[in-house]
Amino acid sequence: MNNSLPRLIDGMVATLRKEVIPHTEGDFARGQAFGVIYMLESLKRRASWSNEFLVEQLRALEQASNDLSDLAAELLGAPLPDIRAPAQAPSATELEALRNEGDTCISKLVDWLADHRATLPVDAVARAEAKIDHYLNRQSKWELSTSAKPMFVEISSGRERSA
Amino acid sequence: MKRKEGEQQGARGASDRGPASTPAFEDAAILRTRLAEYLSARTDAAVVVETLVKFPAGFSWITYGVRLSGFPPARDVILRIGPPYGLFAPYSAMPEFQSLSALQASAVPIPRTFLASDDASILGAPFFLCERVEGGTPLPWGDQEGASLDGVRREALARDFIDALAALHAFDWRATHLVGWGSGMTSDNAALRQLDFWQSRFERWALKPHPMAHRAFAWLRRQPPRASRVAIVHGDYRLGNFLERDNRITAILDWELVHLGDPVEDLGWAFLPQYRGGTPLVCGLASEEDFLSRYEARAGEKVDRGALRFYIVFSLLKLALTHMAAARCFEDGLFNDMRMPAMATQIAPVFRQIAKILERAP
């Protein structure tokens, strides 16, 4: 694929909207197509080509850089590449697992505070909960700011929302 | 190829006696035959299924409009089937069927019930049959009918909506076969029992850790209200779950979450911003003040405002958990309905609403 991911998604959405949905019979079927559009718009705000895909390309470039550097003395002035692949590039799967591990810890802390509330200093509990709430708010704000505009009217009705 | 309304949608479920991997309820021809056989056997009459049309609405039970001949109680009926891949599966038809049967003589507008079974060998999944009541459905998420609830129509529907809820909560379920539902249920443990129920669902449905759900459960468990009485709780009482005709509510629908509990639980759900149809009104029908005033007059008791706040937070949490159920349903690959992942995107906004209430709460 040689187009950018956002442009590909824009193209898919436009095609569904202009070429497919108007020719699809049935509110339910059109609603499903709007559901696909909504999910594509959501992907557009969070997805990118995977690290694994790009890192492998960088490793190939690094290899080519090394191979070509052997010829540097014979190709004076040539624009030889000098690309280095990052040694450590965590995959999205690894990052997601790390986030889940952190959220599991936070969840356990919330439960622990609830279970031990009666025996803990009131002020310490309040400050701990305030810090947890601050964390939860930061996460939810990020989640909302990277979310697509809801399309429940279109999904449930199978029709474009009237202006 | 174009798909016509009422054709089978592309979901998968458990198979039974039908063609390989297709349960009876997913194949219209088999369903017609099986339903006719079942009804004929149950009524000792030659029942014929003339038409069978699948309704596109709903996230959980599958609903068919069925026209019958030879079925003594009615010509047009509704067939509801709880598929093994549905939002709240596994299902039983009994809570909805038994509660509706018990409420037949009440002032709550409901369809007449006919038959029900959890025997999956009949149609491939639990099902029940009830009367097809005439009327349309104003929806909360739309610029369609919901937004046009206005004037005389809105006021009339608000009266019916509130009165039906008060009648439901005042209904003497102990004088019916529902008395068996109340084992161990008291005014003191009604809220905690529901918290236990939904916490077990949270553990089953969550695809990833949700610290905010833990935070909300912990807050709710610190202050469970005492119910003024144990009543039948509809569980999904809102705009979108009733039929109306000529400015009157003709039937309250979707009783799949019915249970015994604190009546304020239904108020908390109805008060959610998600069901206000883009208005400040409860379910797009009445102001909070007017709603509570009429409800209290009809139900004969005051609504504890602290309990109402508790149940609004609990309702938001239940809504977030329902969205998690949708995510789980889709993730498990049992259901390809695109409404499921779309619903799942709403977990974060609902958690944000809970957080805002907790910020202001003691």
Image (spheres, coloured by chain):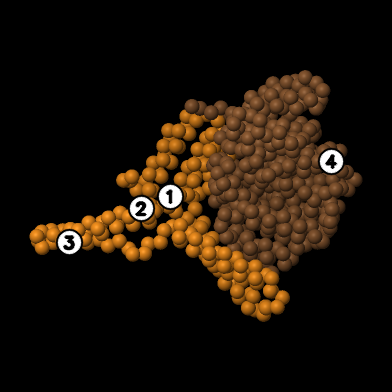
Q: Nearer the viewer, residue B362 or B33?
A: B33
Chain letter of mark 3 equals: A
Amino acid identity at mark 1: Lys
Other-residue count near label 3 (Cα within 10 Å), few / some / many at <14 / 14–19 / ≥20:
some
Please check whether the numbered discs 3 and 1 fall on a single chain.
Answer: yes
In the image, farthest residue toward the right: B175
Q: Quadrant of residue B21?
A: top right
For chain A, give the colour: orange
Task: Point out which mark residue A44 bears.
Answer: 1
Residue B294 visible (yes or no): no
Above/below status of B29 relative to A134? above
Q: Which chain is drawn using brown? A: B
Amino acid identity at mark 4: Ala
| Marks 2 and 4 in Cβ contact (< 8 Å) | no
Q: Nearer the viewer, residue B194 or B150?
A: B194
Image position, residue A146 (x, y; %): 47, 55
Residue topped by disc 2: A53
Please check whether the numbered discs 2 and 4 fall on a single chain.
Answer: no
Dot 3 or dot 2, earlier in sequence: 2
Amino acid identity at mark 2: Phe
Query: Considering the image in quadrants, where does the C terminus of chain B appear?
Result: bottom right
User: Alpha-carbon distance for marks 3 and 1?
Assistant: 39 Å
Q: Quadrant of residue B222?
A: bottom right
User: Alpha-carbon distance for marks 1 and 4?
Assistant: 51 Å
Task: Point out which mark residue B102 bears.
Answer: 4
Q: How many numbered marks are there?
A: 4
Q: Quick one: SS at disc 4?
A: helix
Dot 2 or dot 1, earlier in sequence: 1
Residue topped by disc 3: A69
For marks 2 and 1, give the one nearer the viewer: 2
Image position, residue B169 (x, y; %): 82, 49
